Image: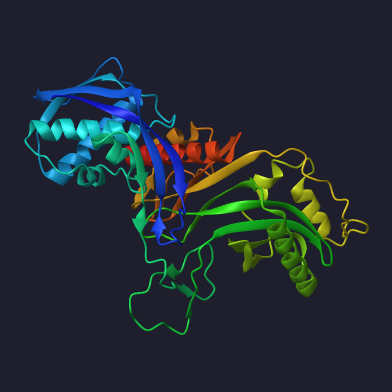
């Protein structure tokens, strides 16, 4: 059984939060010249070979075959020859095309023909975007309308929860005294980080928080990109809000506020009177040490507790971002898994070995720099997919 699957270009997600009523809508284009080309036949033992095969793809194929056997209940083995494949982690959708091409070829041999969208779920692909799945079947220019959400229903939030934890969808039950409803509004969530001395405010930059795409954690914070540009009226309104808050609560040092921009209107969300997740992102673009300035502004050292409007401006805008990797299931972080993760320079916050992670617990982070926000988001998506595949192979 021979099978050829083309590569695709993905032009980014529209409204990943789903507040418009649809989540992960996107555009994509199937292209020629970067195909997956493989051949599969029955065999007494599993054999994976071919000129285009490398160690990473070999492991990926073995994980995919294990998932197929678990889903469709067959015990057959095969010889798989990989003749051609696009470069991995380069924006061509190689993971999805490799998984679908392999799966379709093997199931054709044993006379099974599930729909591609069902097949993709069996091999853990297409959880967010349908571009690669429809591209595999049809090719061409693809408009993905995204997934329908219950965006018009106000979610319930636990008092005292943070980071998107403790927020859940309505189930029709009566809310508890420790819960309250949050109104949903369409728009973009933005964070403003600033230094304060109890009276004055100096903005450091704006960044964009990102929520996880895992279905059971729809509101949980999983990353940040920045710095981003805002239109002047929105930036001025956000700065005005921060000044009012600083004056009211006499805030000092590094602080941040989150707000929603909806049709050029700023809706204040919350205050973070502490060093926030944007600290490392924005530090990249400034020449002075944030931590040193924070210590000075929050200490009693004479002459260091005030700021002025002549505060050092952003030296050079360096676009960077990070994503938090959450455990998809319970697993034990052994030494082999830990060392394998450490070999990737884009990973940070890697835990020590001999730790048992529970499902949905944060494992590590992906941190990248780029020349543009679009390139950054594409690269982060690729690296996140890489890490999840790596964890599934190692655990």
Q: Position of residue 309 (x, y in %)?
A: 87, 55
Q: Does any portion of residue 37 appear in the rendered image? A: yes
Count of all numbered marks drawn on residues in the image: 0
Q: Residue furthest right?
A: 303
The x and y percentages for residue 60 are: 30, 32
Give the residue at the far left of this rendering.
111
Q: How is the image coloured?
A: rainbow
Q: Is residue 123 above or below residue 187?
A: above
On screen, residue 75 versus residue 227, left or right, reads: left
Query: Quarter of the image containing the N terminus?
Result: top left
Residue occupying image coordinates x 44% and y 73%:
154
Q: Nearer the viewer, residue 75 or 237?
A: 237
Q: Nearer the viewer, residue 384 or 345?
A: 384
Residue toward you, 77 or 145: 145
The image shows residue 213 at horizontal and vertical percentages of 41, 53
Q: Position of residue 229 (x, y in %)?
A: 66, 48
């Amino acid at each position: 059984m021979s099978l050829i699957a083309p590569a695709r270009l993905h032009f980014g997600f529209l409204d990943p939060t789903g507040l418009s009523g649809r989540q992960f809508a996107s555009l994509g284009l199937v292209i020629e010249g970067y195909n997956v080309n493989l051949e599969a036949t029955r065999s007494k033992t599993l054999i994976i070979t071919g000129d285009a095969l490398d160690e990473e793809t070999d492991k990926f194929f073995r994980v995919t075959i294990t998932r197929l056997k678990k889903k469709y209940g067959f015990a057959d083995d095969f010889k798989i020859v990989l003749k051609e494949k696009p470069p991995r982690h380069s924006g061509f959708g190689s993971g999805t095309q490799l998984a679908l091409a392999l799966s379709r070829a093997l199931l054709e041999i044993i006379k099974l023909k599930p729909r591609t969208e069902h097949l993709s779920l069996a091999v853990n692909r297409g959880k967010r975007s349908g571009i690669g799945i429809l591209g595999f079947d049809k090719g061409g220019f693809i408009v993905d309308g995204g997934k329908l959400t219950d965006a018009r229903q106000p979610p319930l939030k636990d008092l005292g929860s943070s980071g998107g934890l403790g927020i859940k969808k309505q189930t029709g039950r009566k809310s508890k005294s420790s819960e309250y409803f949050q109104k949903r509004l369409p728009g973009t969530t933005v964070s403003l980080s600033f230094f304060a001395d109890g009276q004055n405010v100096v903005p450091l930059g704006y960044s964009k928080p990102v929520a996880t795409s895992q279905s059971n954690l729809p509101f949980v914070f999983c990353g940040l990109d920045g710095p981003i540009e805002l239109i002047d009226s929105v930036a001025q309104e956000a700065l005005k809000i921060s000044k009012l808050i600083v004056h009211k609560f006499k805030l000092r040092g590094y602080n941040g506020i989150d707000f929603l921009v909806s049709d050029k209107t700023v809706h204040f969300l919350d205050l973070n009177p502490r060093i926030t997740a944007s600290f490392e992102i924005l530090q990249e673009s400034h020449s002075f040490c944030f931590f040193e300035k924070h210590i000075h502004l929050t200490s009693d050292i004479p002459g260091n507790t005030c700021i002025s409007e002549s505060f050092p401006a952003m030296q050079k805008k360096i676009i960077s971002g990070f994503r938090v990797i959450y455990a998809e299931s319970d697993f034990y972080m052994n030494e082999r898994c830990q060392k394998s993760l450490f070999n990737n320079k884009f990973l940070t916050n890697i835990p020590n070995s001999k730790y048992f992670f529970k499902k949905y617990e944060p494992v590590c982070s992906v941190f990248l720099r780029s020349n543009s926000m679009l390139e950054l988001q594409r690269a982060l998506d690729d690296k996140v997919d890489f890490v999840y595949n790596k964890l599934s192979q190692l655990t």
